[in-house]
Amino acid sequence: MKKLKSLFCILLVLLLTVSIVGCGGSGTSTDTPSGSSSGTPSQSQSPSGSPSGTTAGGSTSGVATHSLDDFVSYKVGVTQWLGRFMQGLSPTESWLACDGVYDSILKVDPATKTIISDCLEDWYYEDEVTFIMKLKENVYFSNGAHATAEDLLYSYTAILDRNSTQENSLGPIIWEECVILDEYTVRFKWERPWRVMENVMVYLLCKEWSLSLADGWEDMAWYYPVGSGQYEVTQFASEDIIIIRARDNYWNEAEIGPVYVDEWIIQFYRDPATMYMDLEVNELQLAMVAATDYSRFVNQGGEEGLDVFLLPTGSVMFFSFGFHDRSEWEDKRLREAVAIGVDWDLLGEVTFQEQFSPATSILPERNPFHIQPGKYEYNPERAKQLLIEAGYGPDNPLKLHTTKGDSPMYKSLCENIQFQLGQIGIEVELTFMDTASAIQIWNTGGGNDFFFWYRITGSATGDAWEILSGTTLESGSTVTRVYDPYFRELWFGMAYNTDPAIYGPIIEEIQQYCFDEIIYVPFAEHTISIGYRTEVFSEEQLRKYCYGINMYQLGRLGSLSAWEQ
């Protein structure tokens, strides 16, 4: 890999006129970096052993200034969870690490909002129930195995093998009729039209390697998986750190250019404030910034070399009634009492502060069929009356309980709603725990009379199916399910049509129906803050490769083409 990279050195010098700048924060030069922008190490060397990570020096506003023979290493901070490499078993995979290690068979380009693929030569609907994928003929895994249609099909059937809830995303698929057509081509088949195959993020797996593992899906080798991406895992420590490093002989280098970032260090922080402080002093070069820290940045400014920008994820934050756990929510009067008994703008402002963007529809404004269905007017006195009409009052209060992950955002949301609902006579009990434990409760049911949720991966296009995919699950999470017959009729009508002229009006109707019948209470378009070191990245650059919480396309961002401006 390094030999190939050196061929680009002369070209790089000719193309780039900016000079190498010193490391921000520490004031050291590139001769003595705080982490690594040194000469190329051998594969046995480990320049990333120090906890502080890497230098932010060597790049100015997203433009490469290192020689391709230099070893370039950057550090990304994450909170809530570090993640792992088993996609679909839980929502706690490391999306950014997976993006570097695997090829996502189909994925969204955040800049163009279109579906792209590095490993497929072609993909298309042959008809409304038939989808064709053709793998490129030159795809190779990190163990040297040549990828074929066997691997392509296995990557999808493995979803069944490991009992992944991701199976829901594939709809009414007919597995027996999903077949290999030739060495590189697979045909997928459905009982009914299923328009969202392109929206399902699945990683290309090496079938031979996967089946060789003694302990199957529980094998520890999955923490150092074989993939076809341009990086491989060199260090994994649960709830601490993941390090991925560019591998030799990457199959797609000729198309996307040589690797520029040799190593990404992904550091887990339990405390978002600590992560932000490390970003301020250049111990990190990239991280999602919590709402409180973003507000501090807006109101007080940041340290030199730090900038932060807002990024809508294409998702909407909902208050979800726990239809699975509490049949009482079938009484519309109770749902209306909550809808008008809470000041939703206040809830959003307190929790998200300067990040807050109000929402009244279940779909974001970027959705082409978005409508404004109306707004619930705050009326606590009417809410109290509705509770009395439904059989509740001071001597018989409605009591609710929910279980959430132990994060500042959810604590703020839950404690605020606890106070506001208490003002109209609803008693709320809250339980906070680590995300992994909370997921088990969400999946098994019980203990969630209400819930706050949003599509955590976001949606680059604001797609209705993506945002509402949790509503009709037959397995997995129970907390987002809706059993209203007409809602489900609309949802499946939207999902089982491929003609926008048909599903567009359905999407508009489902928004209005959710408002009129108070199926959910949407109150915020989900927006995140991305903090970065300006010595390394530019906002324009990062917007091309980031689209959700901890969803950085490190594979593409690590290529030289991402640094040529």
Image (tube, rainbow, N blue to C red):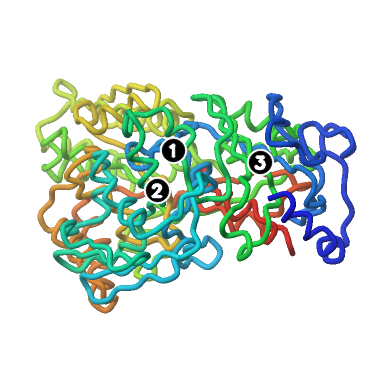
- As drawn, the residue found furthest toward the bottom would be 501
Circle 1: element type: loop
Under mark 3, the amino acid is: Glu
For marks 2 and 3 on the same chain, the one whose residue lies earlier in the sequence: 2
In this view, the mark in front (2 or 1): 2
Residue 359 in the image, given as x and y percentages of width and height:
40, 54
Looking at the rendered image, the quarter that the C terminus falls into is bottom right
**Element assignment for label 3:** strand
User: Dividing the picture into quarters, in which one does residue 115 lie?
Assistant: bottom left
Mark seen at residue 19: none
Residue designated by label 3: 263
Q: Secondary structure at mark 2?
A: loop
- Name the residue tied to disc 2: 205
The answer to whether residue 295 is seen in the rendering is no
Residue 181 placement (x, y as % from top left): 28, 68
Q: Nearer the viewer, mark 2 or mark 3?
A: 2
Asked if residue 357 lies left or right of residue 198, the reply is: right
How far apart are labels 2 and 3 at the CA level? Answer: 22 Å
Image position of 123 (left or right of 531): left
Residue under pointer 1: 85
Q: Residue at x 55, y 25 (%)?
A: 240
Alpha-carbon distance for marks 1 and 3? 17 Å
Instruction: Give the answer, above or below, for where 221 lies relative to 533.
Output: above
Label whose residue precedes the other's in the sequence (2 or 1): 1
Q: Residues within 10 Å of mark 2 (few under 14, many from 20)?
A: many
Q: Nearer the viewer, residue 209 or 298?
A: 209
